[in-house]
Image (cartoon, rainbow, N blue to C red):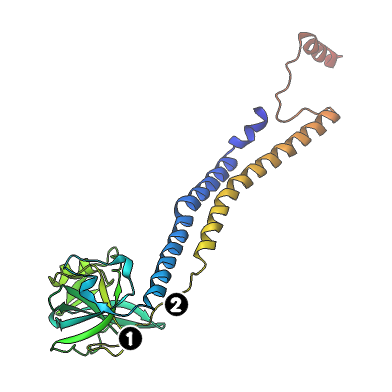
Amino acid sequence: MRRLAFLLRPSWLALAAVVLGFAYLCFTVLAPWQLGKNTSTSRTNSQLEHALTEEPVPVTTLLPHQDSSAPDQQWRPVTATGHYLPEAQVVARLRVIDGVPAIEVLTPFSVDDGPTVLVNRGYVRADDGGTRLPEIAPPPDSEVTITARLRDPQPAIAGKDPITDSGVHQAYSINTEQIAALTKVPLTGTYLQLTEDQPGGLGVIALPRRDAGPFLSYGIQWIAFGILAPILLGYFAFAELRARRAESAARAGSGEQDADQPAAPMTVEQKLTDRYGRRR
């Protein structure tokens, strides 16, 4: 065990702490993060591919009442007849469309004999780099029929709660629960995104590309890094131990005292010889 005493030195302890901490992050944070993004992307791609072949159905078949959600039907095309509620309109800030700052316009839509759904009417370009609200065309004030795609609500952003400024409702994510609380208008959990050439439509938001991305390979890489890091630490420790053994063997062959071994105690005869022999 004395040979392994060097592992208790501060430098080795610090290295071990860094390596083990890195491995822990790989398995608990980094790999799950990438694998989770891969799962989400795969789910979106599957739903989108299925939805592109579907014909529109009345929204009330998938969202029959006010508390409805359709998480397994994202991107499914639907039709809805009713009227917009412009007094409860919300703008979603800090959006980027084709690399340019934009604002998405969200207006509740009361479906005839059905629930009230949030409709993403599309986008308008932001003025002054997104610091000033542009002019937004109002939706039709009469009954209309729209075609849209079902969308899952976005997660709320911590520290970015919706606000009302100068009479304009503003949000930073399309979270139907937050928007319902802000506007005092009950909304379904799933919202709608208008397709092209629809009543009340603005700039059309394009469908996402069906690209799996590198998330799966990144997740596997982080798992590999988490496995390799402790193995490399063990290899370096073994290499250090082997070097120390070779050094000890070389010292033993030359008659030198091993630095890692304490000196053997001198006998009484050796002490007397050393003391009186030096006097002569």
- Please tell me in which quadrant of the rendered image residue 177 appears: bottom left
User: Does the residue at mark 2 contact the one at mark 1 (Cβ under 8 Å)?
Assistant: no
- Residue 23 lies left or right of residue 41; in this view the side is right
Instruction: Please name whichever residue, 32 or 114, is drawn nearer the observer in this view of the structure.
Output: 114
Residue on which the image places disc 2: 209
Please state the horizontal and vertical placement of residue 138, each as a whole percent of the image: 18, 89
Q: Is residue 273 above or below residue 203?
A: above
Mark sitting earlier along the chain (2/1):
1
User: Residue at 21% of width from left, 90% of height from top?
Assistant: 137
Instruction: Please name whichever residue, 162 or 277, is drawn nearer the observer in this view of the structure.
Output: 162
Disc 1 residue type (three-letter): Val
Disc 2 residue type (three-letter): Arg
Q: Secondary structure at mark 2?
A: loop
Q: What numbered label is drawn on residue 204?
A: 1
Please state the horizontal and vertical placement of residue 51, each as a whole percent of the image: 36, 75
Which residue occupies the extreme right position in the image?
280
